[in-house]
Amino acid sequence: MPKDDLKIGVFVCECGTNIAGSVDIDTVVEDAKKLGNVVYSTKNRYMCSEPGQAEIKKAIKEEKLDRVIVAACSPRMHEPTFRECVASVGMNPYLVDMANIREQCSWVHMGNREAATTKAKDIMKAYVARARYLQPQDEKEIPVEKATLVIGGGIAGMQSALDLADAGYQVYLVEKEPSLGGLMSKLAKTYPTMDCAI
C-alpha cells in the first residue's frame, strides 16, 4: 500500500524545444503541485545536464524527498543518468521514475499545444500515482559460470561454438546425430566453388 506521508518531487524537462515547443511546461509544473504527495515541482531547460541534476540533488536534500519523477524523454535514454543522480545523495535508485512526455506526448502532438499539454498533465498524474507504489530495490551480483551450451551441430551451431570459444567461453556442443554438419553433410558440392561439402 502507498504511504500517505510520502514526499514526491516532480522535475519537468523542457528538452530545449523538443518538449517546450509543444507543451506548456509551466502549466504542467503548476498542475503537478496540486497532486497528492507532491511537495516540490519545477522545470529545467535540460534536466539531464549537470545543473539539472544538481537541482534534483538539492531538492532531495532540502525537501527530504522520498520519490522523484522526471518528466522528460524516453527512460531508455536517461534512466541510468537519473538513477545515478539520486543514488549520489543517498536515495535508492529505484525510487526515481521517468515519465516520457517527449516521444509519447510532445512529438506526437506537434502543432497542437493544447492536446500536448493536456496529455502531459495526464501522464504526470499517472506517474505520481505510480510513484506511491515504488519500492526500494537492492541489486545483487550472482556469479555466472563462463560456459555455454550450443544445441545442434549444423553449420550455425558449429560457427556459434567457434565464436563463443574464441570469446573465452567453455563450449558444450550437443548434436543428436552421430556426426556434425547437419544438412550440409548431406550435400555433395557447395556453390559457388563446387567444393565437396564435407
Image (tube, helix red, strand yellow):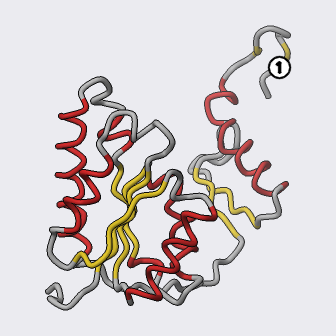
Q: Nearer the viewer, residue 106 or 169?
A: 106
Asked if one can make out residue 55 in the rendered structure from this viewpoint, the answer is: yes
Q: x, y percentage for residue 118? A: 17, 43
SS category of the residue bearing label 1: strand
- Residue 142: image quadrant is bottom right
- Residue 35: image quadrant is bottom left
Residue sitting at x 73%, y 62%: 171
Residue sitting at x 55%, y 58%: 48
Q: Quadrant of the C terminus?
A: top right
Asked if one can make out residue 74 in the rendered structure from this viewpoint, the answer is: no
Residue sitting at x 69%, y 36%: 155
Q: Residues within 10 Å of mark 1 (few under 14, many from 20)?
A: few
Q: Nearer the viewer, residue 66 or 194?
A: 66
Q: Which residue is mark 1?
A: 196
Q: x, y percentage for residue 4? A: 14, 88
Q: Quadrant of the N terminus?
A: bottom left
Residue sitting at x 67%, y 56%: 173
Q: Amino acid at mark 1?
A: Cys
Q: x, y percentage for residue 122? A: 17, 52
Q: Nearer the viewer, residue 15 or 134?
A: 15
18 w.r.t. 31: above or below: above
139 w.r.t. 157: above or below: below
- Residue 50: image quadrant is bottom right
Q: Nearer the viewer, residue 79 or 152?
A: 79
